[in-house]
Image (tube, helix red, strand yellow):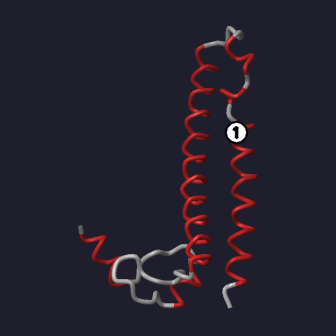
Amino acid sequence: MLQPIKKHLKSKERKLKKRKKALEAEDPFADVDRVNDNAAVDTDAAEEVGHDRITALKQEVDKTLIRVRKTLTKIKLGKYGLCEGCKKLINTDRLAIDPTITDCIKCAKKTKKR
């Protein structure tokens, strides 16, 4: 029953790893020759903005990778679909929308209020 979810998450994990590598290659700071380049101030600013953008995108990819890996571990341990707050089953419709959800609606609302 969990095999399709596991397959989906493994596929998502592979795509996220590829995306992370692509972002790393796209980072202007990855070019070692840029240090020797006496670029204009506007070029340096563009590189800085590009680097900041790539860094933010990589952080989002990393967060998603962590959630995917955590979910795969829960599947392996037989704890997938259990709310981390109240330990009750999470609604399957909620899990269908995002299989990496960790809280039921009640606990998510409680957390959001804090």
Residue under the image location 75 percent in, 45 percent down: 22
- 63 is higher (above) or lower (below) than 30: below
Q: Which amino acid does label 1 sit on?
A: Glu
The quarter in which the C terminus is drawn is bottom left
Q: Where on the picture, by quarter, is residue 106?
A: bottom left
Q: How many marks?
A: 1
Residue under the image location 62 percent in, 76 percent down: 76
The quarter in which the N terminus is drawn is bottom right
- 95 is higher (above) or lower (below) than 67: below
Q: Where on the picture, by quarter, is residue 110?
A: bottom left
Q: Where on the picture, by quarter, is residue 64?
A: bottom right
- Residue 14 x, y percent position in the rendering: 75, 60
Residue under the image location 53 percent in, 90 percent down: 92
- Residue 98 x, y percent position in the rendering: 56, 77
Q: Mark 1 points at which residue?
A: 24
Residue under the image location 63 percent in, 26 percent down: 47
